[in-house]
Image (cartoon, helix red, strand yellow):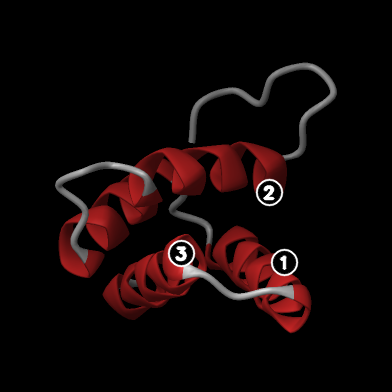
Amino acid sequence: MKAVRAGRSSVDVAMLHLVRLVVDDDWSPASAGERLREATPDDAVLRRVHARVIRTLVERRGHLDDRAVATIEAALAIG
């Protein structure tokens, strides 16, 4: 993963990358998962991102939330 910007954790950086992936018009779980895995090779970080997204689903659920879960699960399956 690229250097973490000042004040941002590796989870925050991965979340930002995830958001960019799920709003892409050409999104697919497999390609987004591969790109997320390349950007975030650490399983522990991906699991924390997954937990953060799942906690959000308790409050609301939408199209992009489903994409986010599918992307993270695809990235975790690669590793």
List x then y, in percent, for residue 42.
53, 57
Where in the figure is residue 28, as x and y percent of width and height?
18, 62
What residue lies at 66% left-to-right and 26% top-to-bottom?
A: 4
Can you say which quadrant of the picture contains the C terminus? bottom left
Task: Categorize mark 1 by other alpha carbons within 10 Å: few (<14), some (14-19), many (20+).
Answer: few
Query: What is the CA distance from the residue labelled 2 to the residue labelled 3?
Result: 14 Å
Q: Which of disc 3 and disc 1 is earlier in sequence?
A: 1
User: Sequence order check: which comes first, mark 2 or mark 1?
Assistant: 2
Residue 20 point in image, percent of width and height: 42, 38
* Residue type for callout 1: Arg
Within the image, what quadrant is residue 50 found in?
bottom right
Q: Dot 1 lies on which element?
A: helix
Question: Which of 31/47 is in front?
Answer: 31
Name the residue type under label 2: Val
Q: Mark 2 points at which residue?
A: 11
Q: Which labelled disc corresponds to residue 52?
A: 1
Q: Name the residue under label 3.
A: 68
What residue appears at the point 46 percent right and 64 percent down from the top-left corner?
68
Above or below, 55 against 10 in this view is below
Q: How far apart are marks 2 and 1 (CA)?
A: 9 Å
* Residue 33 horizontal/vertical position (percent): 30, 61
The residue drawn where x is 28% and y is 42% is 24
